Image (cartoon, rainbow, N blue to C red):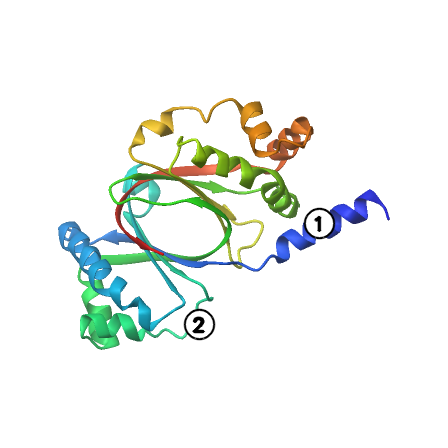
Amino acid sequence: MSKLFLLVLSALAAQAQTPAVYATATYSNWKPGMAEKGRARHKEFVEKVAPARSENPNARGFLVLERVFPTSMEAGHDYIFVSFSRTPPTFSGQIASHVLKAFGQTSVQYRASLNEFRSAQKQEIWTDVYRHGSFTKGGMVRISYVDPPANKTLDFLDMTRTYESAIRAEIVKRGTYQAQQLFQLWSTAQEEPYNFVHLAACPDSSCFFKGLGNRIDLFRAAHPNDPNYSRYVERYNASSTIRKYAIYRINEVALR
């Protein structure tokens, strides 16, 4: 069996891995003068809906990220509301029953209450590639928007699952960051601006201005029996292209 054939099989297996988590990310802007009301509404949402998730065993929780850099004019949005689930979205357009019950509203009333303070810009569906660590309210998250070069998406996935995931887990283990998580955008064409989002979280923004540590040392700690560090670096550099990044404050979090 040829080495090329084995690489193709490995890449296809990486692509076909079933997601453990599906995330629906809604990018929105505050309506003029409504930011404080919006933040209060997000707080109320977490307080009311998180206890009601027992009615929906597939719900994994919520993450509210308010953008702090760059400006909204450059970024195109003020915040991202991310809802996590064990199962894919249904595209039914219906608000989850446990959410409506928590607020005591109909679907029409609920949507109207959201539209009072926000203007939704776009939605994305993310599927998890790896997730290490957790998020803390009041902490910071840097999202890197990653776009592998043409024909490199499969290699990026295979490289990530073979090498990078364990290295990112080691970074969290050492306390350099609280979380290192990578998601792939669902149903996104190769020519789109980005195909993956990487979330790196820490208590404050200072860690974003520090290095991750000695790269060789991290590799050896994560892969003690693999001598192919140069191969890892070669594959990483060939497939990992960051198009842009933005920094967010974690306003609310309720994950399980």
Residue 148 shown left or right of residue 80 in the figure: right
Q: Where is residue 171 in the image (x, y as percent from the top left)?
A: 46, 33
Q: In this view, does 166 lie above or below 104?
A: above
Of residues 237 and 161, the one drawn nearer to the viewer in this rendering: 161
Q: Dot 1 surroundings within 10 Å: few (below 14), some, or many (20 or more)?
A: some
Q: What element carries label 1?
A: helix
- Residue drawn at (54%, 28%) of the image: 218
Residue type at the position of mark 1? Ser
* Residue that sits furthest to the top in the current view: 214
Q: Which residue lies furthest to the bottom in this view?
A: 106
Left or right of 183, for residue 110? left
Q: In this view, does 84 lie above or below 147?
A: below
State which quadrant residue 49 falls in.
bottom left
Say which residue appears at 62% left-offset and 31% top-offset. Answer: 224
The numbered mark at residue 90 is 2
The answer to which of 238 and 119 lies nearer the viewer is: 238
Please state the horizontal and vertical placement of residue 185, each as a whole percent of the image: 50, 53
Location of residue 89 in the rendering, given as x and y in whole percent from the top left corner: 44, 67
Please name the residue shown 27% across and 70% down the image.
Answer: 99
Mark closest to the chain's N terminus, 1 or 2: 1
Which callout, 1 or 2, points to the residue nearer the camera?
1
Residue 131 percent location from the top left of the image: 47, 47
Which disc, if any, is residue 10? 1
Locate the C terminus by quadrant.
bottom left
- Residue occupying the point 29% across, 49% down: 79
Task: Examine the image and state in which quarter residue 119 appears.
Answer: bottom left
Q: Which amino acid lies under the numbered mark 2 shown in the image of this protein? A: Thr
How many other residues sit within 10 Å of disc 2, few (<14), some (14-19) or many (≥20)?
A: few
Horizontally, residue 104 falls left or right of residue 82, namely: left
